[in-house]
Image: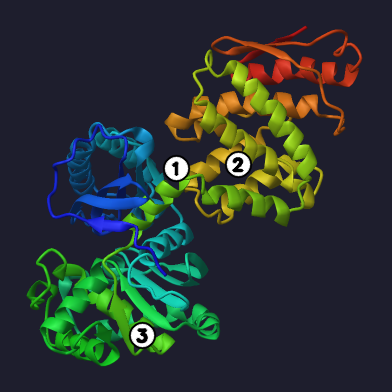
Amino acid sequence: MRVDLFAHRKECLVVPNSDENIVASIDLGSNSFHMLVARYQDGKLTVIDRIKEMVRLGDGIDSNNQLCPDVQARGLACLERFGDRLQGIPQQNVRAVGTNTLRNTENAADFLSRAEAALGFSIDIISGVEEARLIYLGVAQDIAVDGQRRFIMDIGGGSTELIIGSGAAPEQMVSLEMGCVSVTRRFFEGGDITPERIAQARIFAQMELEPHVERYLKHGWEQTIGASGTIKAVNRVVNAMAWSESGITLDSLHTLLAELGEVSHVKNIKFEGLSVERAPVFIGGVIVLLATFEALGIKEMMVSDRALREGLILDLVGRFEGEDVRDNSVANLAERYHAEKNQAQRISQTAIQVIQQVANPWQLDTEQAEKWIDWASQLHEIGLDVAHSRHHHHAAYIIEHCDLAGFSQQEQQLLATLVRCHRNKLPAALFKALPKRARKFAKKLSVILRLSVILHRSRSANIIPEIKVVAARKSIQLIFSDEWLANHPLIRMDLEQEVKYLHSIDYSISFT
């Protein structure tokens, strides 16, 4: 029997944020910004507050693929309001993510730094596939029937996600570069609606879907579910107009598009159940939805109230419960590229011993540091499956460019940097390319990982002796017992070379 983790209460803004059981998710979509606040207690999530604002980020991109000042100002003002609502909630209890528009615009990084300051919390950019996984996670807790394979569709402002899965696990996921805002902007520029423009938009959507149709139809499903503001708006309209008794049908979509074809301009789009804010981008979403129905042979779709933000909350709670999907992603990648588990484990264990001794002087969150060092240890040699020469480069490329469930793009960049810097030279530029909040953390973990790799150079199962570690702000001292270092001249030579390498990032090392 499916257990619904979400309970609801009508009142809003009544629970003090100092409660450590309060969790929140923020979705910076291409059309709307959403925030969900909930209390997690006794295995149940109780929704306290929901806030949505039509920022229409994807509608403010200029000819140079940059976010315009006006849309940035709208977004920052919205995030300031969200931030005010979130005051008092612990940093680790909030997850904020950006999607299609922030994945693709040229000045997204500049906007993000200002957005994080306005919100008061870090903001992660997630890939389209990760967005699809989180959407599935949120929707699968809603109206899905146990034991049935389900098809879930979410139309955002800039992208559309199609997912097939059963239970809590997605099996097929794709994120398509088309959404209600992007299709409306591209084919109905200026707002004019003509039969020719509608036809061109439909062909475009069909072309985007075509590479995936055969695979999805072969996989099959028993239940069809739609999510997101666009699909919910379509559902309200076709039900209010009595074109469908419940849910969305193929016939109701044909009728809806025919009615839209009679409207000369997007400013004239008015239907019962359609908000004034959504009307300007409604036609693009309808065309994407209809094209998907036709391509995949869908006759009827039920609609869920849940989407990405609920998935974010459930994923966050999973981390608290020790069910971090990132652990499985790392383990699967290590296995795929035949990383030697025993060597990875030795390096991880020694690195964790070092972390426990330097955590206070280096102001490290021990739990987070140990998690990241373990992931990096598991993956630092996956590049050997490509070639021994420059294998740390190969490993970093794989990590940064593959789909790692649970990781944001910034997190994959951080993990790739740790792996890239586990040996040889330390390019300072790699750390500068990281988000500012991650740079010091990355440098400290890189130093620790490098030392552990050196100490296990022999790849031997022999246990190395206990090492005392003394750390200051940007320095680390290793104190070995007895004559161990004298009996391992290759390791001593590596440590002497490490003095020069660490100098490039302003760290020093000494050893006795």
Residue name at image x 26 percent, y 51 percent: 46
Q: Which mark is residue 416?
A: 2
Measured as percent of width and height from the top left, residue 510 is found at: 71, 9
**Can residue 137 be seen from the camera position used here?**
yes
Q: Is residue 15 left or right of residue 94?
A: left
Measured as percent of width and height from the top left, residue 227 is found at: 31, 69
Q: Earlier in the sequence, mark 1 or mark 3?
A: 3
In the figure, 52 relative to 391: above or below?
Answer: below
Q: Quadrant of residue 465?
A: top right
Residue name at image x 35 percent, y 69 percent: 154
In the foreground, 83 or 88: 88
Residue beneath disc 1: 320
Q: Are marks 3 and 2 in contact (CB under 8 Å)?
A: no
Secondary structure found at label 3: helix
Q: How is the image coloured?
A: rainbow
Measured as percent of width and height from the top left, residue 443 is found at: 57, 25
Question: Separation of disc 1 and disc 3 at Cα?
Answer: 38 Å
Label 2 CA crowd tier, 10 Å (few <14, some 14–19, many 20+):
many
Residue type beneath disc 2: Ala
- Which of the two discs, 1 and 2, sits closer to the camera? 1
> How many numbered marks does the figure carry?
3
Residue type beneath disc 1: Phe
Which quarter of the rendering shows the C terminus?
A: top right
Q: Which mark is residue 293?
A: 3
In the figure, 432 relative to 288: above or below?
Answer: above
Q: Earlier in the sequence, mark 1 or mark 2?
A: 1
Q: Earlier in the sequence, mark 3 or mark 2?
A: 3
Residue name at image x 35 percent, y 76 percent: 225
Q: Are marks 1 and 3 in contact (CB under 8 Å)?
A: no
**Can residue 425 be seen from the camera position used here?**
no
